[in-house]
Amino acid sequence: MNIDFALVLVVLTSLTGVIWLVDKLFFRQGRKDRAVQNRIEIPREPVLVEYSRSLFPVLLIVLVFRSFLFEPFKIPSGSMIPTLLVGDFIVVNKFSYGIRLPVLNRKVVSIGAPQRGDVVVFRYPRDTGINFIKRAIGLPGDTITYRNKQLFVNGEKIAASSAGRFKSSDVKCTMPAADARLFGEQLENANHDILLHEHSRSRNGQWVVPAGHYFMMGDNRDRSNDSREWGFVPEENLLGRAVGIWLNFDFDKGCADLSRVGDGIN
């Protein structure tokens, strides 16, 4: 079951804020006046009001920070190996591509747009309750060609230099496939590694990116469910740009790689 934490946070913040405000406007002074008239100690706030007053500012700060500044995400799959590994907990810059209202995800302030090579978190077009993370390969108007494991953008071949095999010594928790090979790829200003598997077929095709959409691919090119399978990502599905790793812990394997903490994402 997918829980919409943004919705839960908005509901809790609104509820505690309303309870605190209604008590302040209509009931608090009455409690004080009755206590003065009866010459008794002013009674404590009702438990619900006390908790609401304490929690509201905390929830509001978390809501603003998470919705408009930075939000944590966890990497659940290997589609972005070697850039991101299973168990990476990442930080996403929420204002890179504009400020959006929580839950509604409606843009209210335009700031920027994805650049080719950005690692982007977005809502999966076929099920917006699921978040995906991929690399932005195609911008609106681009023609993307993938042929024999070679990427072309607007007819230009994207250079990919061999960096040898992806070995178990390269990572601590993720076991690489025996036929996995590393390549260094240069996408304009984004210099990053990709992973290709010698015995996997190439998912060939050509796509023209429509206006207001983006073409996304995983760095683990032969093990990624991406735009080659399900098409383009609409601009309104964008959540932000992945900027750093704050923890690595693979709960399934009980394995952590603390050397990745603090690494930036290129």
Image (cartoon, helix red, strand yellow):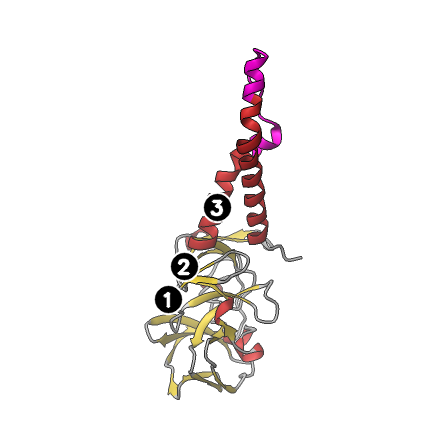
What percent of the width, then of the height, locates residue 210? 48, 81
Q: Marks 3 and 1, how far apart in space? A: 24 Å
Label 3 vs 1, first from the N-terminus: 3
Kindly identify which residue carries mark 1: 112
What percent of the width, then of the height, locates residue 154? 39, 86
* Residue 193 visible somewhere in the drawing: yes
How dense is the environment of label 2, judged by Cα within 10 Å: few (below 14), some, or many (20 and up)?
A: some
Q: Is residue 39 magenta?
A: yes
- Name the residue: 62% across, 54% down: 3
Looking at the image, which residue sits at the far left? 189
SS at mark 2 in the image: loop
Q: Is residue 10 left or right of residue 95?
A: right
Kindly identify which residue carries mark 3: 62
Q: Is residue 97 left or right of residue 225?
A: left
Kindly identify which residue carries mark 2: 95
Span shown in magenta: 32-51
